[in-house]
Image (cartoon, grey):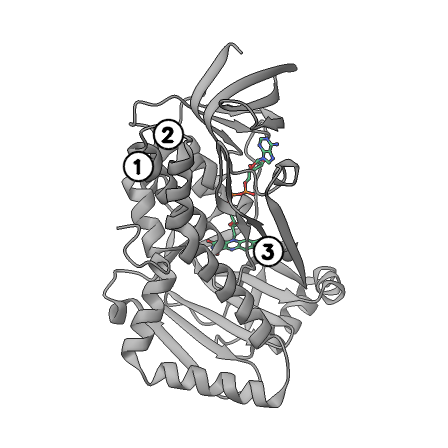
């Protein structure tokens, strides 16, 4: 084999690109294979936690995300039931609880810092062999098949290749929900407040973005398809009925897109010469905006293990990475999954219990602060700092 690198990353989405950038000054050979030739305008607007902002600052990508809107307050409520809670940046002792930025802009800010020989756009990995003394990956690039060896192969491909890896099981459960996403404008200004409203059909989030909101509206697939086919006026009326009038009238909206939602995770998330990060390791429901934030914490932990390793890709290095990420990853999966199970139903006793839980949180500032910090920094608070 003629080509060899220390770290080969399959998938150059935001998580794969962030890992390459985190290793930029580490005196290691790192290569990213990204199947797409040019960036595509992904319509997702993502909530980055304050912890993720610090990480992106540290690796030099935050300055490229010029249009992020800070979140000062998060308002959590349930439709058709009592109880609500309000989380604030001030109470948590941070400048903002999080920031809303587009997938496209976050991705572009990361990739712009990587050399073209590090980030191979248009390189699609097809085979991964982990049976030898190093990992080996076959990929197609500029109409040629190439093979490269690596001390460590990192899968950051969103989970597409994992099913071919021996010894790793991929678990998947459909939520029976789609996320409808797009931009909306309301009569009242957002005042940097994000709204998370739980409804029997699924959660609805309005995230402050520029001078309007980014909408994430979850609904059953058939219902989502109908909503997506509505004329603008009908769409706004339906949204108004669903969310209520806390923000006055829904005045306008842009084009909407639909994303089917499923929980997907791999166990274990390491194998010989291999580590999984981001959506390849776990793909979550977008409720409470945890997916990319969790992925960036995977990146921080793996970059640290790679830098400190005596042998990159060794069993002990991978065991350390696995141990470091176990708790936060399991917590993220359980937290988002439980929210959906708990809030997406109409059983009266559960509705009352949810109301009581929200009301109790609202009366307990230390609990609110604890909760906010876990959302910002992960289960092992401080792991990013
Ligand atoms: C509606 C919605 C809203 C969301 N909101 C939030 C939010 O507010 N906050 C948050 O933190 N997260 C949110 N998420 C989750 C977030 O989008 C993901 O967690 C994040 O995009 C994962 O990044 P990734 O790089 O791991 O994977 P991806 O973004 O899926 O990137 C994978 C990359 O791998 C490439 N690839 C695939 N196969 C190959 C191959 N064989 N060879 C080479 N390259 C390959 C793909 O082209 C792609 O570029 C949301 C998700 C959805 C669906």
| Residue at the disc numbered 2 | 113
Q: Position of residue 381 (x, y in %)?
A: 30, 59
Using a 10 Å C-alpha cutoff, classify the residue at mark 3 as few (fewer than 14 neighbours), some (14 to 19) or many (20 or more): few
- For ligand 1, tell me if the residue under mark 3 lies within 8 Å: no
Give the secondary structure at mark 3.
Answer: loop
Q: CA distance from mark 2 to mark 1?
A: 8 Å
| Residue at the disc numbered 3 | 254
Give the secondary structure at mark 1.
Answer: loop
Q: Position of residue 6 (x, y in %)?
A: 41, 23
At 51% from the left edge and 64% from the top edge, which residue is drawn? Answer: 334
Horizontally, residue 379 falls left or right of residue 163, namely: left
Give the secondary structure at mark 2.
Answer: loop
Q: Position of residue 223 (x, y in %)?
A: 73, 67
The correct choice, above or below, for 41 with respect to 180 in the image is above
Q: Nearer the viewer, mark 3 or mark 2?
A: 2
Tell which quarter ligand 1 is in.
top right
| Residue at the disc numbered 1 | 60
At 36% from the left edge and 44% from the top edge, which residue is drawn? Answer: 301
Horizontally, residue 74 falls left or right of residue 381, namely: right
**Which one is earlier in the sequence, the residue at label 1 or at label 3?**
1
The residue most toward the left is 93
**Which one is earlier in the sequence, the residue at label 3 or at label 2?**
2
Q: Nearer the viewer, residue 24 or 88?
A: 24
């Amino acid at each position: 084999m003629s080509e060899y690198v220390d770290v080969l990353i399959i998938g150059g989405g935001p998580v794969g690109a962030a890992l390459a950038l985190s290793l930029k000054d580490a005196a290691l050979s790192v290569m990213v294979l990204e199947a797409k030739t040019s960036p595509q305008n992904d319509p997702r607007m993502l909530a980055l936690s304050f912890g993720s902002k610090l990480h992106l600052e540290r690796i030099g990508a935050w300055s490229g995300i010029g249009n992020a809107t800070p979140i000062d307050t998060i308002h959590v409520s349930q439709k058709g039931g009592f109880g609500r809670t309000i989380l604030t940046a001030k109470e948590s002792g941070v400048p903002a609880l999080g920031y809303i930025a587009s997938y496209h802009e976050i991705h572009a800010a990361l990739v712009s810092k990587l050399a073209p020989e590090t980030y191979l756009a248009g390189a699609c990995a097809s085979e991964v062999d982990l049976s030898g003394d190093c990992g080996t990956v076959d990929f197609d690039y500029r109409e040629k098949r190439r093979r490269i060896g690596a001390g460590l192969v990192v899968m950051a491909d969103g989970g597409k290749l994992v099913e071919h890896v021996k010894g790793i099981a991929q678990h998947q459960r459909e939520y029976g929900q789609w996320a409808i996403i797009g931009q909306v404008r309301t009569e009242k200004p957002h005042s940097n407040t994000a709204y998370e409203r739980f409804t029997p059909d699924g959660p609805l989030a309005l995230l402050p973005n520029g001078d309007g909101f980014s909408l994430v509206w979850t609904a059953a697939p058939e219902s989502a398809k109908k909503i997506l086919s509505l004329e603008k006026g009908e769409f706004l009326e339906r949204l108004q009925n669903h969310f209520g009038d806390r923000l006055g009238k829904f005045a306008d909206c842009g084009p909407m897109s639909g994303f089917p939602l499923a929980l997907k995770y791999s166990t274990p998330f390491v194998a010989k010469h291999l580590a999984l990060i981001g959506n390849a390791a776990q793909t979550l429901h977008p409720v409470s905006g945890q997916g990319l934030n969790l992925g960036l914490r995977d990146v921080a932990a793996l970059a640290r293990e790679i830098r400190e390793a005596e042998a990159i890709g060794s069993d002990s290095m991978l065991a350390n990475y696995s141990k470091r990420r176990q708790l936060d990853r399991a917590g993220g999966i359980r937290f988002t999954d439980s929210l959906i199970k708990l809030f997406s139903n109409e059983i009266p006793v559960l509705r009352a219990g949810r109301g009581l839980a929200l009301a109790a949180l609202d009366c307990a500032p230390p609990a609110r602060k604890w909760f906010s910090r876990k959302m910002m920094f992960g289960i092992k608070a401080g792991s990013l700092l």
